[in-house]
Image: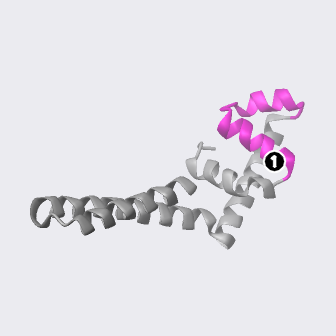
Amino acid sequence: MAKNLDIIMLLDIYGEMLTQKQRDFLEYYYNDDLSLSEIAENEGITRQGVRDAIKRAEVQLLDMEEKLGHCRSFNSIKRSVDEIIELSDKINEINLQSILSRDINDAVARIKTLAQLVKEEQ
């Protein structure tokens, strides 16, 4: 089982929809970086039992993402906001090099502020 950043993000988004035990196992494995053997020892079950529980929980998280798409939407919004900020910087640079419009400068500053707020809320 490769440790996967996608699973960590899915756990953050959909973790409350798992059982407490599933959530605990995934958090131990992905967030606390415990091995399957360490989790098994702490929980008093077999390594194979831990592995199976983690695999089932991962499948559930992936299934929820397939149906609901929250992670996909989050990533899309993040990419769009990053592009908005980048384009705002380009507009501001062009404005400074040629037009020097205070209205453009103010509008760009407002766009960047709003984009940063959206990014922080994500």
Q: Secondary structure at mark 1?
A: helix
Q: Is residue 39 magenta?
A: yes
Q: Residue at x 66, y 40 (%)?
A: 30
**What is the magenta range?**
19-45
At which x and y percent is residue 80? 42, 66
Which image quarter is the C terminus in?
Answer: bottom right
Task: Farthest residue to the front: give it.
Answer: 102
At which x and y percent is residue 112? 38, 59
The reply, left or right, for residue 92 in relation to residue 81 is left
Q: Residue at x 69, y 51 (%)?
A: 11
At which x and y percent is residue 69? 62, 69
Q: Residue at x 29, y 64 (%)?
A: 87
The reply, left or right, for residue 101 in relation to residue 122 is left
Q: Are there few (<14), some (14-19), or many (20+) residues within 10 Å of tag 1?
A: many
Query: Label 1 is placed on what type of residue?
Result: Gln
The reply, left or right, for residue 121 in relation to residue 39 is left
Dominant secondary structure (helix, strand or loop) of the stretch shown in magenta = helix
Q: Residue at x 45, y 56 (%)?
A: 116
**Residue 122 in view of the camera:** no
Q: Which residue is mark 1?
A: 22
